[in-house]
Protein backbone atom coordinates (compact mmCIF):
# COMPACT_ATOMS: atom_id res chain seq x y z
CA UNK A 1 0.00 0.00 0.00
CA UNK A 2 1.20 3.50 -0.79
CA UNK A 3 -0.36 6.90 -0.09
CA UNK A 4 -1.73 7.30 -3.62
CA UNK A 5 -3.49 3.92 -3.44
CA UNK A 6 -4.86 4.77 0.00
CA UNK A 7 -6.20 8.12 -1.25
CA UNK A 8 -7.93 6.44 -4.20
CA UNK A 9 -9.48 3.79 -1.96
CA UNK A 10 -10.73 6.37 0.54
CA UNK A 11 -12.19 8.52 -2.25
CA UNK A 12 -13.86 5.45 -3.72
CA UNK A 13 -15.37 4.47 -0.36
CA UNK A 14 -16.69 7.99 0.21
CA UNK A 15 -18.19 8.09 -3.29
CA UNK A 16 -19.75 4.64 -2.97
CA UNK A 17 -20.96 4.72 0.66
CA UNK A 18 -21.12 8.41 1.59
CA UNK A 19 -21.77 8.89 5.30
CA UNK A 20 -21.67 5.11 5.79
CA UNK A 21 -18.09 4.74 4.49
CA UNK A 22 -16.45 4.42 7.92
CA UNK A 23 -16.08 0.59 7.90
CA UNK A 24 -14.45 0.62 4.45
CA UNK A 25 -12.19 3.53 5.41
CA UNK A 26 -11.23 1.75 8.64
CA UNK A 27 -9.92 -1.17 6.58
CA UNK A 28 -7.84 1.14 4.38
CA UNK A 29 -6.52 3.02 7.40
CA UNK A 30 -5.52 -0.22 9.13
CA UNK A 31 -3.43 -1.10 6.09
CA UNK A 32 -1.93 2.40 6.00
CA UNK A 33 -1.00 2.18 9.69
CA UNK A 34 0.58 -1.24 9.18
CA UNK A 35 2.39 -0.51 5.92
CA UNK A 36 3.26 3.20 6.16
CA UNK A 37 3.13 4.09 9.85
CA UNK A 38 1.60 6.73 12.07
CA UNK A 39 2.71 9.74 10.01
CA UNK A 40 0.96 8.58 6.86
CA UNK A 41 -2.12 7.58 8.86
CA UNK A 42 -2.36 11.03 10.46
CA UNK A 43 -1.75 12.75 7.12
CA UNK A 44 -4.77 10.98 5.60
CA UNK A 45 -6.96 11.68 8.65
CA UNK A 46 -6.23 15.38 8.22
CA UNK A 47 -6.41 15.43 4.42
CA UNK A 48 -9.83 13.79 4.27
CA UNK A 49 -11.15 15.30 7.53
CA UNK A 50 -11.83 11.76 8.75
CA UNK A 51 -12.10 12.78 12.39
CA UNK A 52 -15.05 15.09 11.76
CA UNK A 53 -16.75 13.02 9.07
CA UNK A 54 -16.18 9.45 10.31
CA UNK A 55 -14.85 9.74 13.87
CA UNK A 56 -11.47 8.32 12.82
CA UNK A 57 -8.97 10.10 15.05
CA UNK A 58 -5.26 10.71 14.50
CA UNK A 59 -2.85 8.36 16.19
CA UNK A 60 -1.12 9.73 19.26
CA UNK A 61 2.63 10.07 19.37
CA UNK A 62 4.58 7.29 21.03
CA UNK A 63 6.57 9.94 22.89
CA UNK A 64 5.26 11.97 25.79
CA UNK A 65 5.55 15.72 25.38
CA UNK A 66 5.58 16.38 29.12
Image (cartoon, grey):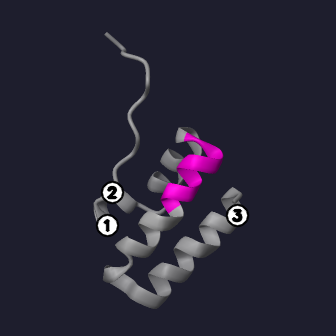
Q: Name above or below for residue 60 compared with residue 4.
A: above
Quick check: marks 2 and 1 in contact, CB under 8 Å? yes
Give the magenta range: 29-37
Could you tell whether 16 is left or right of 60 in the image?
right
Quick check: marks 1 and 3 in contact, CB under 8 Å? no
Give how far apart the Cα atoms at labels 2 and 1 are.
6 Å
Tell me what residue is drawn at x 45 percent, y 69 percent.
25
Query: For the residue labelled by badge 3, is the local secondary structure a helix, a strand or a loop?
Result: helix
Give how far apart the Cα atoms at labels 3 and 2 are.
20 Å
Q: Where is residue 37 in the image (x, y as percent from the top left)?
A: 58, 41
Quick check: marks 3 and 2 in contact, CB under 8 Å? no
Q: Mark 3 points at which residue?
A: 4
What is the number of the mark on residue 51?
2
| Quadrant of res 54 | bottom left
Q: Name above or below for residue 28 compared with residue 64.
A: below
Could you tell whether 51 is left or right of 33 in the image?
left
Q: Mark 1 points at which residue?
A: 54
Tell me what residue is drawn at x 53 percent, y 65 percent.
28
Amino acid sequence: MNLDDARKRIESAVTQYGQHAAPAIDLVMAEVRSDLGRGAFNELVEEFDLELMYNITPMESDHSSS
